[in-house]
Amino acid sequence: MASAPLKSALLIVSTTAAQDAAADASGPILTQVLKDEGDGKWEVLETAIVSDDVLQIQRQIIAWTDGPDGINLIVTTGGTGFASSDGTPEAVIPLLHKQAPGLVHGMLAASLQVTPFAMMSRPVAGVRNKSIIVTLPGSPKGAKENLQAIIKTLPHACLQASGANSRVLHSGGVKKLESEAGISGSESQPADQGHHCHHHHGHGHGQSHGNLVRHTNPSALSNDPSLGPSRRHRESPYPMLSVDDALALIAEHTPEPEVITAKVDGTIIGSVLAEDVSAKENVPAFRASIVDGYAYIAPKNGHFKGVFPVTAVSHAAPGEIGSLKDGELARITTGAPLPPGATSVIMVEDTIIKTMTDDGKEEKEIEIDVQGVKEGDNVREIGSDIKEGTTILKKGELISAVGGEIGLLAAVGVAEAKVYRRPVIGILSTGDEIIEHNRPGALKLGEVRDTNRITLMSAVKEWGFEVVDLGIAKDKRGSLEETLRDGLRRADLLITSGGVSMGELDLLKPTIERSLGGTIHFGRVAMKPGKPTTFATVPVKDNAGQRVSKAIFSLPGNPASALVTFHLFVLPALHKLAGASPVGLPKVPAILSHEFSLDPRPEYHRVVVTVGNDGLLSATSTGGQRSSKVGSLRSANALVCLPSGKGVLEKGTKVDVLLMNNIRGA
Ligand code: AMP
Ligand code: MG
């Protein structure tokens, strides 16, 4: 293959985007696909936006195909539907010197696997002069999927179209072409291996590389439990997603946070502000003394000298104070208001008592001799800490228990604020073998103490969310459905554990899909531990009778898997529901303190991260990582994201770690 990059151009066909380029979401995504999934073969030379107008479309395409630039690939997006304004295929067809129905077929076949609505797209593809032209739908997701479906074959098509010697190109046969293109004809949907744990927290658009990602399936996916074990699927019908793709779906489908007005008291702690808050009052609200001493009127020449009578006292207490006259002092305490007329305060340390009152209880006269005094000495002016009307906290800020935000709200007289409602999280365990963790007595054969529920409840609380304990559901459809329905009434988001692997009693997916009418957004993730992690949303009515959707995370039953997947997948959703950003665990670089063996799946290895004398963070494994092994999480404060692969990552390698807890000193 030629090493110089192939030249591509993007044509956004959208009347809206033509008026406001910011409305175009597809252009940047397609550019990204060409960059990320084009194996470095593409360069996007030009991007243009035109209205849904046949002439404008044709003019731009001709400028590219008939011009001197020799564009190899023109990708259009938009105008391929059935609406009266959709005319991109009509604009392109007359321009084509050769049609390319194979590319059209490839795109449609891929899209139809995702949704039957792909039938509503009318793509065309072909060659004009030396350029390949492909029309993609306007929706960012559809456009991306279509481009991903054909991207591996396009370099070859472009080289042929540009006039390369086809005998040379084809020497070596189809297998060689496939391997050069990085595709395999026999393997239709390889699991997304080689994924390197790049997290786009909260805003990933990631799809797997070059392969169509099947998010949902229009036909029933889950087992029909009534059919019995012999009829269940032998292999999970859910496509294996990369962690990034799973995170992107979570970001997309987790419901938006709800805005409420909250009173500024202890209950607001842990909430995120949904509005900028400005100071209702000045702080301080009056001219206040910074020291214990005497208020006075500063002489113009700065030399404050003489014996002065103490005519008033100002304590830090509300009340009226008479005005001060020249040559008089008012005794004043720290934080107390200056009497009207006073300009400054002198510290008690700079004064001497001259005489006392007759009863000997009060100071009568004070002697002072200091140079360089001026107006405003030792005085906090009105609003000098916070001016009335200034923004004190911004939308999106967390009102933390330790961060002083609550103090700020209190100081300026803000009694209530708009915040995102803090979600209530319902947590249940599933499994006939699971018993309460504190049930007295020895275990009977097969019994397992409920480890996950109490662990997840404490983790959710630690991250600042409210928890509802939904108990243990039996592996019976009725029990599970009833517990889930109860949970959906009482909580905003549910976390279950167990019951998501391929066992015949694994009822979660079928119950969510068949009994609750939910949508499973993913049911398998290429990772270790946590492969069967499942994310779904179900439609429910809220208390006001409004249709809303609630998220359910069904985590694997093995305790280590459950806790790892909680941190990786559920936490970002909790953050989104609570209006917090960035979402998910904070990510920091660290150095491996010993070698780590790699696994064919990306692995989230439990580690202890400590800070060394050099200030660098180092990560040490907590030991055996079997997913059932609860002990692997003891003292773990981070997850290290090991890429899939063979062999080892050497000691000293710099990696990213996701922090679950505070870092300790070495
Ligand atoms: P499952 O996904 O239901 O097949 O569960 C996988 C494994 O995790 C089984 O060995 C279960 O016994 C175990 N398991 C499931 N739920 C829990 C739980 N709440 N606490 C401890 N172990 C569990
Ligand atoms: Mg189970």
Image (cartoon, rainbow, N blue to C red):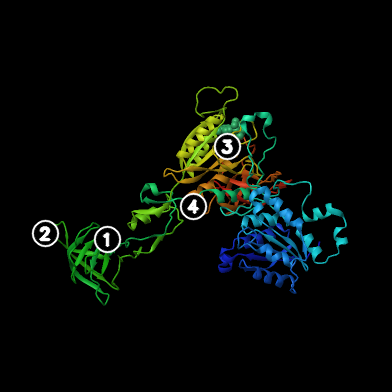
| Upstream in sequence: badge 2 or badge 1 | 1
What amino acid is labelled 4 in the image? Answer: Ala
Side (left or right) of 273 relative to 659: left
- In the rendered image, which residue does mark 3 sit on? 514
Closer to the observer: label 1 or label 4? 4
Closer to the observer: label 3 or label 2? 3
Asked whether disc 3 touches disc 4, contact meaning CB atoms under 8 Å apart, the reply is no
Q: Secondary structure at mark 3?
A: helix
Asked whether disc 3 touches disc 1, contact meaning CB atoms under 8 Å apart, the reply is no
Q: Which mark is residue 358?
A: 2
| Upstream in sequence: badge 1 or badge 4 | 1
Give the x, y percent position of residue 373. Answer: 29, 72
Q: Report the residue at 68% width, 72% height from top.
A: 59
Q: Which mark is residue 580?
A: 4
Q: Which mark is residue 292?
A: 1
Q: Nearer the viewer, residue 166 or 408?
A: 166
Side (left or right) of 124 relative to 394: right
